[in-house]
Amino acid sequence: MGISVDTFFLKPDGQGTLQAQIQQMIAEGILSGRFHVGEKLPSSRKLATHLGVSRITVTLAYTELLANDYLSSKGRSGYYVSQNAPVPPKYTPVERREETVDWNYALARRFSDGEFLTKPPDWRDYRYPFIYGQADRTLFDHANWRLCAVRALGHKDFDSLTGDYVDQDDPLLIEFIARHTLPRRGIAARPEEILITLGAQNALWLASRILLRHGRKAAIEDPSYYALQEILRCSDATATALRVDKDGLPANTIPDGTDVIFTTPSHQCPTTATMPVNRRHDLLKRARDLDAIIVEDDYEFEMAFLGAPSPALKSLDKDGRVVYVGSFSKSLFPGLRLGYMVGSEAFIREARALRSLVFRHPPGHVQRTAAYFLSLGHYDAQIRRMSKAFLNRRKTIEEAINSYGLTVAGRGVFGGSSIWMKAPDHVDTSVLSQTLQQQSVHIEPGASFFSGPDRPKNHYRLGYSSISSERIPQGIERIASAIRAY
């Protein structure tokens, strides 16, 4: 019995080459149980005509499936589902029983009560996505990233691909960060003072678990990164939120008894304020007087297209009390989930031990791919390309904001990829964002960034990393119209 050619179709949004898509289509049919052992597949000519592809493409797909024992061939009679093809498991689902566990009691901690920013899963289909921190596929060097990934799959890199680093990191990636990335921020560090993390958020979590416990006190910025607020909420420490001004966190507001200070001096999150050098010295002095540790999240320092970035707080630190956090998520892509921490050897030793208990280490292949991409110069080329595009978008969005009379609450002095906005006091931007989504516009409501019960609800963030300059003015016009109609 033959399988009807009408069973086969290529998905409009299919990924990979046509050959790969055909292979996947047939393999999925076998694995799902739709195609049975011994059934004959359509001839390569018939399937090629049906799919609108070349016959050689179908033949190569069949040949690859034959080599992997999904298919078998019988002389000139064609291809059949192999007797050795994987067989989908047969099972009868167990009848669902009523649970008797009292989860209100069993759950010793709750992590789902916090407020997190979410984005529509189809945001890429929006015409005006003012979304923050997402990669623009038109700016990403996909070709060279793919080449680096293929190189990292080679025999020479077999150990980094398959090995268990236990509590170590890829030496090539560590070397690049130590010799190229950190010196740009004025930081000198030895390999044993650097730890690779699953992004900056993971680094902040590691720092909080090591530095804080019940009875200790932390100081955070207000507004600040909403995930950091949740991390500290689950740490059993006492966190004090300190209102930032146009220059970031005022050192003189940090209360006595503070043990750990969390700050974003280069691009304050979310206001994008840049802390002046004199205030950085004041902050270091205040921390010294308190004998406190500073955790510096230095995200987006690469996006300084309006002027040279200020020196990192870590570069001014003479006592070893600053723990520096960096990430490749904003400059490469957030799905990469690669960041790093720099600190005194005693701190990094504990962070490495804690990391090994949770997930041992970030995947070796990902680390080696990133190391090649960085060391071969592709990263610097991408940063230049992104900076040029962001500069143009920044000019366009500021002109549109002025033209339509919107209010800026904070903009990065040296660049960045977002602008912090303020609507009239009566506007709840959570409601506004839902209204705008119906017009294919996405903005980020700002209430989640604030602390306390009386959080302002009229702030919002406009990211411009994923929207073209041509679409910005009309998107801003729709935002302005929605605010006027609120």
Image (spheres, rainbow, N blue to C red):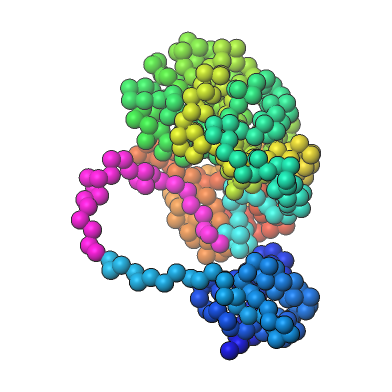
- Residue 51 percent across, percent down from the top left: 70, 80
Q: Is residue 42 visible?
A: yes
> Does residue 143 appear to the left or right of 402 in the view shown?
right
Which residue is depicted at the point 55% across and 52% down?
443
Residue placed furthest toward the bottom: 1
Above or below for 362 versus 14? above
Looking at the rendering, the stretch of residues picked out in magenta corresponds to 97-122
| Image x and y of residue 156, in percent | 74, 42
Q: Nearer the viewer, residue 238 or 286?
A: 238
**Image vertical order of residue 253 relative to residue 121, above or below:** above
> Horizontal placement of 438 versus 312: left or right?
left
Q: Is 298 in front, or is 188?
A: 188
Please name the residue shown 64% across and 47% down the image: 333
Instruction: Please identify the residue farthest to the top as the structure is shown.
Output: 289
User: Is residue 100 rendered to the left or right of residue 81?
Assistant: left
Residue 311 appears in the figure? no
Whether the magenta-drawn stretch holds residue 426 is answered as: no
